[in-house]
Image (tube, rainbow, N blue to C red):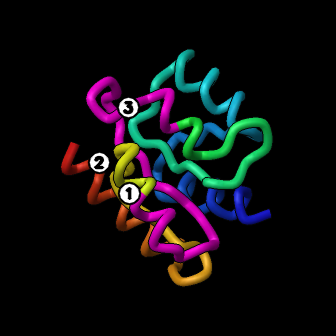
Amino acid sequence: MLRSLYVKKFTASGFTVRTASDGEETVREIQRLAPDILLLDLYMPKMDGFQVMEQFPRGKRAFPIVLLTNFDQTDFKVRAGELGGDDYFVKKDMTIRSLLEMVEKLLKKN
């Protein structure tokens, strides 16, 4: 449900959006066509967000990764940083507008 809201808002803001239903599908989609940016949920079936990140280390990918989660845990943030996460978005504490701004900033930076 939240995913469809994100898709709607990002599409309305001019972005082309691709989605995946689990970590394995995410990896396949990235290998098929690398994104300009990846919004990655930490909790997904088959492979979690950290496992997906391990497949695409910072030095070997051309796109930033924003981690999405419902949990504001320091150990998650540290692990995300160690794996090359470019930003960390706690869904319950932030608005979709702030996520859009975060994405736009990262795209300009890269």
Are circles 2 and 1 on residues that touch, CB within 8 Å?
yes
Q: Is residue 34 above or below residue 43?
A: above
Q: Which mark is residue 26?
A: none
Pointer 3: residues within 10 angstroms few (<14), some, or many (20+)?
some
Q: Magenta part of the protein: which range?
A: 53-78
Q: Position of residue 110 (x, y in %)?
A: 22, 42
Q: Which residue is more in the foreground, 76 or 35?
A: 76
User: In terms of secondary structure, where does tag 2 sit?
Assistant: helix
Q: Which residue is more in the foreground, 65 or 96?
A: 65
Q: Earlier in the sequence, mark 1 or mark 3?
A: 3
User: In terms of secondary structure, where does tag 1 sit?
Assistant: helix
Of badges 1 and 3, nearer the viewer stands 3
Q: Please state, as top left, top right, bottom left or bottom right, where the N terminus lies in the image.
A: bottom right
Q: Which residue is mark 2?
A: 107
Q: Which mark is residue 103?
A: 1
Q: Position of residue 105 (x, y in %)?
A: 27, 59
Q: Position of residue 18 (x, y in %)?
A: 62, 37
The answer to which image quadrant residue 48 occupies is top right
Residue found at the far left of this picture: 109
Q: Which residue is more in the foreground, 62 or 74?
A: 74
Q: Which residue is mark 3?
A: 57
Q: Earlier in the sequence, mark 2 or mark 3?
A: 3
